[in-house]
Image (cartoon, grey):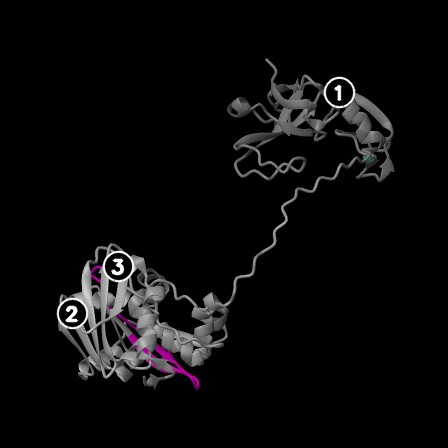
């Protein structure tokens, strides 16, 4: 049997079962015949999303019979011969129901010549040869558009994909006035882009590609109209099993809060709130800190304040940060308040939260104006933690 581009006619037929796409065979119940000059005849039966191919001399019952010579048949199937040109030039003939025969285009994944590597030229041939099979006609209702590809460099070429009346056709030239034309200085960049090796932004930014016409058509409509191109080489690479080790690492850590914060947390356990008072400026810090950040002196004097006070400021939080202690995101909205506890003055406030259902009722203090009076709501089992105060609520 003769070979064309390293492929025999029977290679195409013998690989049909493997290349069959059941999703392309929906609602199809038909017999197709292939009559390949000097090679033989094959009968393709498609029914119930399944197919059968057999070499036979009897093509009776076929809805349509395709006739071609071996070179043309292999050429069309491998992307080396333009199908439309071959048909127009009479190299491919179809007897019978032409429309039914058109449906065979979606039945199979493209025939790929088994190779160790695919060149840019191989990829381009495969990408455009699969365009019609990847076309989703139900997305093309009422669309009349043409997409031109002008790809430069040593492996480049020109293609135009036409869509009209829900039919997709392809030429290996740029014809008429395309709806949009995509130009790449080097066809290799186009191949890398389609394979996802480089992104469009960096190609465009580098001035390696440009588009003319209705860009939206290329950017938004093309991806909807066509199934994504699948790299045939990707399926040849044996998938490596990923080794995953799932483990939650738990570190039982303890750290000292220090004498000052420790005193404050211990106080919460006893339902007491401690501040400390700067010996230099006299301001109260709550929670207490080891030094006064204003005066930069050690602060030793501890004083009990509150536990009641007035709200000076409140933020209603709609976008919650994760809780730094638990990593959990709080339910929004919540009211984050600064409370001026009794015994403190000016801006010597302590941050905490207001009871969820009272957010609306809170008045903020402002200058001489008093804010809403609040009291802490204590956790029953206190452990010396800031959440020993569950929240503050209005003190009525
Ligand atoms: Zn101070």
* Range of magenta residues: 139-160
Residue at point 59% right, 25% down? 354
| Residue at the top extreme, as displayed | 396
Q: Secondary structure at mark 1?
A: helix
Q: Nearer the viewer, residue 98 or 333?
A: 98
Q: How many numbered dots are placed on residues in this image?
A: 3
x, y percent for residue 146: 27, 71
Mark 1 / mark 2, whichever is N-terminal:
2
Q: Residue 378 lies in what quarter of the image?
A: top right
Q: Which residue is mark 3?
A: 25
Q: Does the magenta-highlighted stretch encompass residue 8?
A: no
Q: Which residue is mark 2?
A: 64
Compared to residue 323, the image places residue 162 above or below, namely below
* Mark carried by residue 269: 1
Residue at point 69% right, 29% down? 350
Figure quadrant, ligand 1? top right
């Amino acid at each position: 049997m003769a070979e064309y581009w390293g492929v025999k006619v029977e290679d195409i037929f013998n690989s049909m079962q493997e290349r069959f796409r059941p999703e392309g065979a929906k609602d199809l119940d038909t017999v197709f015949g292939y009559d390949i000059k000097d090679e033989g005849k094959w009968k393709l039966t498609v029914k119930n999303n399944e197919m059968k191919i057999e070499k036979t001399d009897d093509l009776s019952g076929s809805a349509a019979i395709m006739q071609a010579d071996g070179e043309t048949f292999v050429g069309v199937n491998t992307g080396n011969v333009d199908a439309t040109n071959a048909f127009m030039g009479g190299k491919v003939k179809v007897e019978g129901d032409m429309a039914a025969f058109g449906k065979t285009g979606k039945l199979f994944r493209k025939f790929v010549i088994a190779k160790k590597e695919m060149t840019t030229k191989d990829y381009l041939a495969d990408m455009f040869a699969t365009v019609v099979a990847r076309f989703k006609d139900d997305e093309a209702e009422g669309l009349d558009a043409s997409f031109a590809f002008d790809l430069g460099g040593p492996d480049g070429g020109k293609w135009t994909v036409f869509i009209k009346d829900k039919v997709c056709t392809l030429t290996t030239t740029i014809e008429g006035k395309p709806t949009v034309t995509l130009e790449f200085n080097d066809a290799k960049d186009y191949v890398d882009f389609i394979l996802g090796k480089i992104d469009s932004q960096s190609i465009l930014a580098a001035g390696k590609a440009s588009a003319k016409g209705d860009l939206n058509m290329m950017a938004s409509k093309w991806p909807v109209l066509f199934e994504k191109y699948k790299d045939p080489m990707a399926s040849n690479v044996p998938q490596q099993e990923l080794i995953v080790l799932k483990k939650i690492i738990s570190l039982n850590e303890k750290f000292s809060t220090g004498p000052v914060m420790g005193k404050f947390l211990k106080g919460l356990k006893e339902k007491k709130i401690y501040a400390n008072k700067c010996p230099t400026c006299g301001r109260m810090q709550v929670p207490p800190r080891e030094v006064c950040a204003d005066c930069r002196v050690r602060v030793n004097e501890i004083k009990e304040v509150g536990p009641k006070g007035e709200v000076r400021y409140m933020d209603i939080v709609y976008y919650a940060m994760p809780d730094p202690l638990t990593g959990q995101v709080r339910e929004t909205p919540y009211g984050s308040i600064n409370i001026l506890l009794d015994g403190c003055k000016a801006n010597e406030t302590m941050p905490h939260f207001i009871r969820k259902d009272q957010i609306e009722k809170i008045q903020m203090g402002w200058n001489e104006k008093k804010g809403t009076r609040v009291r802490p709501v204590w956790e029953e089992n206190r452990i010396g933690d800031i959440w020993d105060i569950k929240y503050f609520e209005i003190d009525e």
